[in-house]
Amino acid sequence: MLRIGLVSDTHGLLRAPVMEFLRGSHHIVHAGDICDSQTLEQLSALAPITAVRGNNDRGAWAERLAESELIQLGGLFLYVIHDLAQLDIDPAAAGVHVVVSGHSHKPLIERKGAVLYVNPGSPGPRRFKLPIAAAELLIEKGSVTARINEFAAQ
């Protein structure tokens, strides 16, 4: 089984429980609004990472990040974009199995046809009354499931 850790909208804050949740991931995907290069360094110490640039990611370090990424993990294709409203492909037609996005800070798992859409929410600074959250994908024998994990505010 392949475990993919999913985060978005950390906004420069990586809480210890979130880091512990991500530990043991085979790969980590960050769907943008990272806000500093140290966050990527910390995450890359846990597992290989794929990250995209969010609307709050600025500076030389952020310019190196693409606005979207298509990656293959465990035989499945994942498309990563910060703001789902800016989705520029038809995921099903492109053979994408999972779309990972962020921006809204609202955790969501939704299947539309053959495509699984996952927004891990935000484990960064709390916004409104939204939960502090991250997610994981579990890939086994060509099948994928997603789970959102909520964390207590500290």
Image (cartoon, helix red, strand yellow):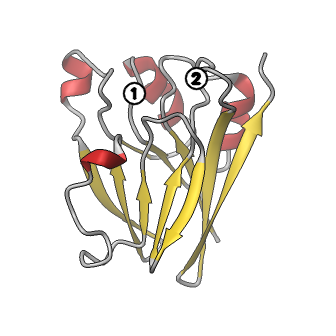
Quadrant where the image shows the C terminus: top right
The label shown at residue 33 is: 1
As measured in the structure, the alpha-carbon distance from the residue carrying label 2 to the one carrying label 1 is 10 Å
- At 38% from the left edge and 34% from the top edge, which residue is drawn? 32
Q: Is 27 placed left or right of 103 in the picture?
A: right
Q: Position of residue 13 (x, y in %)?
A: 56, 18
At label 1, counting other C-alpha atoms closer than 10 Å, the crowd grade (few under 14, some 14-19, many 20 or more) is many
Furthest-bottom residue in this view: 141
- In terms of secondary structure, where does tag 2 sit? loop
- In terms of secondary structure, where does tag 1 sit? loop
Image height check: is 75 above or below 20? below
- 2 and 1 marks in contact (CB < 8 Å): yes
Q: Residue 96 or 117: which is nearer the viewer?
A: 117
Quadrant where the image shows the N terminus: bottom right
Q: Quadrant of residue 60?
A: top left
Q: Going from the N terminus, do you reach mark 2 or mark 1 first?
A: 1
Image height check: is 60 above or below 85? above
- At 49% from the left edge and 36% from the top edge, which residue is drawn? 8
The label shown at residue 124 is: 2
Image height check: is 23 above or below 93? above
